Each structure stands twice: as structure tokens, then as C-alpha cells.
Image (tube, rainbow, N blue to C red):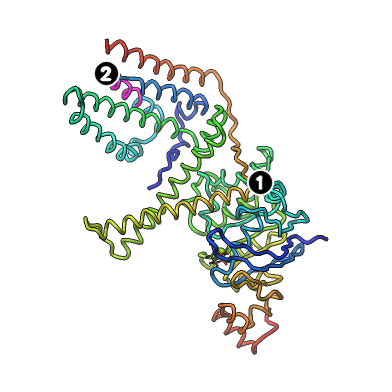
Amino acid sequence: MAAVIEIDNLTFNYENGTPALADLNLTVEPGETVVFIGPNGAGKTTLFLYILGLLRQVPREVTVLGESLTSAQAVEAVRGRVGLVFQNPDDQLFCTTVFDDVAFGPINQGLAPDEVKTRVAQSLKAVGLSGYDHRVPHHLSGGEKRRVGLATIYAMTPEVMLLDEPTSSLDPRGRREVIRLLKEFKGTKLVATHDFELALEVATRVVLLHKGRICADGPPLEILTDETLLKNSGLEIPLVLRYFLELRGGSGEFL
Amino acid sequence: MHPEIDRFAHLDSPLHRLDPRVKIAAFTCFLVAVALVRGLSGAGLALGLAIFWLYLSRIPLSFTIRRLKAVIFFLASFLVLLPLTHPGGWQAGLERGGVIFIKGLAMVLTIIPMFGTTPFNVSMKALARLHLPVRLVTMILFAYRYLFVFAEETRTMQQALKARGFKAGSNWRTFRSLGNLVGLMVVRAFEHTERIYQAMVARGFKEKFGTLYEFSWGWPDALKGAVIVLASAGLVGVDHLWLR
Ligand SMILES: Nc1ncnc2c1ncn2[C@@H]1O[C@H](COP(=O)(O)OP(=O)(O)OP(=O)(O)O)[C@@H](O)[C@H]1O
Ligand SMILES: [Mg+2]
């Protein structure tokens, strides 16, 4: 089967000259959950925006679901099949009611009104927010906003999801909930995060970004426990995970 | 504070039930009529009608009054300035200022039931159906969304300032800090709006207005529209007769 996402030698600088991504090569196979880690400013958000052609360029280095994105039409066609959940839910939600926000994508996909309504109801149910239809999105709590953000993407039934720090600023229960929802989504996932636990729990593969470059790419445990590698990229193993590893005698078989 | 004009769009009233296209077209007609009024009595009548629309809409008075404060402040400047500067003397100036004040008030009071009794995105779709260019409607939608963003940014920045012990005074430092602040706020609001636009595009937005709202109109709509249009015509007529 063809790769879900293929990136061929991508280098990207912002208009003001800030280098954001450099010599990036990546292939994501169907069904993978690739977690991107890396310090602030590593380029995780930039990569996701770039893949969907949101940085004012035709992302010609990118091939998504077998379509190479060399024209504006190709990019538009692919947007319906790849969902992006933004880092900050306040960017994601812009309508005056939750219903309108969740319905926005399906309507753009040209679905019939009844189908749109069903999709909205299903997605809100999936994230545990049935009955929130008429609430005002920017008055919700952080956790609720996150979940509405997820629902807006679920409603479009994408084949691939790009999730930018889906668990940041959530309390433990909110985090659990989001991780559970991620696991339920069966398609291919790309997740950017600083949350090692999330990475250990959902990743089939971890990619370490630093200064716009890929420094490491491999099995989650191998990368997330490699002290020197992480230190050289400006990251460190969280205390809890470190204790756990020590208890287990340094490495290996604890999952 | 949230500048959401459609907060009470879920209520039920004769105006809420009016077809949005008819509502916008008829009230636009009324707004034009108010603009045409020249005399004090005509302006008074316009204000009376505007208050009547507001009453019909069942939008709470407290909401309207909060929204009116800034407007009254702005309009009152005419009341002060015109008597001082009018070539026909202070009395003529006062009358002129009074007419502008009352007309302005009447217009704002009309806009609240006009856009406050329909969910905002449905109003936008109605504008598109009334053959306003899609680009223009997109711009209005963005200006509206931008208001929220701006209000939010203002609030967080104010809090950040206060948290660090900032007190406004009439000195150079205050002036400079506030200048910087406004600049930064514009930039932040702009970037935020940019990201919102990205989020819209990411979900397949192509400058077309989708909403599930199905427009339909029948006799009641035609009748209500006719009442508003007749009131507009009456207003212009009365103003004309009175002036002679
Ligand atoms: N709109 C922009 N204009 C200019 N430079 C930008 C812009 N957005 C991001 N950058 C820069 O690009 C680089 C990569 O930023 P990016 O937001 O992709 O990092 P990130 O890995 O998502 O970080 P974080 O973990 O903090 O979210 C940074 O150096 C950042 O300063
Ligand atoms: Mg980021």
C-alpha cells in the first residue's frame, strides 16, 4: 500500500527569514501513530501547517495519500481527507455556536443537511459533549474546547489526523479522556507533543525534531529513554519516567 | 465583555421569526429613511419607531444599554461641538446637533434588533443571498470575528499590565507603555486572526457560506416587511411635511 505521507527534502523558512524546517525527509505508512517530540521552536507546528499547505505555498515536497501536492487544487482536495487539530483550541473554534463549529467542515465537504446533522451529533457524542450544540465555544472550559476541537475534525471523517499538542493545558482527567479518544481513532495519526507519557501510550514510532531537523526516528522506548540523545536536542526525561526506569533496572521491558 | 451582537438570537419574537432576508432588506430601508430625516420632530419619530422595533425583539434592555454607552459618548460630541461651530448661531447648532444625536441613536437602536435576532452566520448567508459580493460578506464576517479577538486580547493585556503593578497616570511613561500596548495588541490580534483563517481553510473553507439554515418566507414575512417599509416611507413623509 502507498505511504500516507511522504516528504521529500523539505526546507522552509518563514518570510522574516526565520529558518523553521531543514532537509526534512519522512515517510509515514498507513496505520502508524507517529509522535513528534522536540523542544519549543523545533518546528513541529510549522511542519503540520506546511503539510496542509497553510503557509502560503504549494507544498510540492509533500505527497499525501498518493497525491503529490503540486497544485492548489490538489491541496484543497487533500484537506478534506486530512484533519488538523490546532495547538490552541481558540484558533480552531470560530463560530458562534458549538453546532455551527462542528458543522463547518462537513458543510464545506458538501454533505446533505441531514448527513451534516448526523455527523455533528455523532462527533459530539464521541467526545462526550452531547447536548452542547447551542453553547458558545469561547465560553467553554479548556478541556471542553479541546474536545469540541476534536469533534470538528471527527465530523469530517478524515483518513489521517494531525494533532498539535492535544494534551497541553489539560488536567489529568482531561488528558486521559483525550488519550482515550486518540486511541479510538483508527486512522493514521501524527501527533506533536511535549508529553512523554502520551508518546509512550499512543506512539508506534517517535520522531525527534531539533532546530527544524530530524535527529532521531525510531521505536518509542528507544528514543524516549536515550538520555544523551535527548539532552543533545534540548530535552530531558521527565522525573517520573526516570524513576520508573531506575526501578526497572535502567531499561527495557516495562510496557 | 463580549461584543456578540447575536447573543439573544435564540429568543422568540415576531422579529426572530421574520425571514432574515426580509428583515435585513426592510431594516436597511428603514435605516436609509432615518438618514434622510432632517427635522427634529422627524428624528423624534424615528427614535420612537426604533424603540418600538427593539421592544418587539424582546432583547433585554440591559444588553442594549451596555452596548449604547460608547455610542452615546461619540454622538454627544456633536451636541457639544455643533453649537460652538455652527454658522447659524448656537441655537441652530444645538438643533442640528440634536437631530444628529437622535438620528444616530435611532440607527443604532435599529441595528440591534436587525442583527441581534438572527444567528450571525445566518445573517451573513442572508446578505450573500441578497447578492452582496461573497468577498464583502467574508470581510464583514472577519471584521466581526476580529472584534472578539481584539476584545479578548485587550482583556488579557490589561490583566497582564495590572498584574505587574501598572497604574495609568498622565505622564510620558504611561503614554509610551500604552502606545506599545496598542501596537502589540494589533499584531497579536492580527496573528490570531491569521491562525483562525488557517483553521477555516484547513477545514475546507473556500469563501462560500454554508449553513444549514433554510430560508423560507410566507405571508407573515411579507406583511411584517411591508409594515417596516411603510413605516420608513411614513417617516420620510412626516419629516417632509413638518419641515414645510
Ligand atoms: N509566523 C511565524 N513567523 C516567523 N517565524 C515563525 C512563525 N511561526 C513560528 N516561527 C518560528 O519557526 C520556528 C519553529 O516554530 P514552531 O512553532 O513550528 O515550533 P514548535 O515545535 O511547534 O514549538 P512549540 O513546542 O513551542 O509549539 C521557531 O523558531 C519560531 O520562532
Ligand atoms: Mg507548536
Left or right position of B21 against A33: left
Q: Which residue is mark 1?
A: A119
Left or right position of B22 against A38: left
Residue A113 position (above or below residue A225): above
The residue lying toward the viewer, choosing from A69 and A159, is: A69
Majority secondary structure in the magenta region: helix
Q: Position of residue B59 (x, y in %)?
A: 39, 34
Left or right position of B119 against A225: left
Q: Residue at x 38, y 29 (%)?
A: B110
Q: Position of residue A173 (x, y in %)?
A: 54, 66
The residue lying toward the viewer, choosing from B163 and A72, is: A72
Residue A251, quarter of picture: bottom right
Give the secondary structure at mark 1. Answer: helix
Q: Which residue is mark 2?
A: B41
Q: Position of residue A150 (x, y in %)?
A: 60, 55
Q: On what subunit does the disc labeled 1 rest? A: A
Asked whether the residues under the numbered discs 2 and 1 touch, taking CB atoms below 8 Å apart as contact, a structural biologist would say no
Q: Which residues are magenta?
A: B43-50
Q: Residue at x 45, y 52 (%)?
A: B189
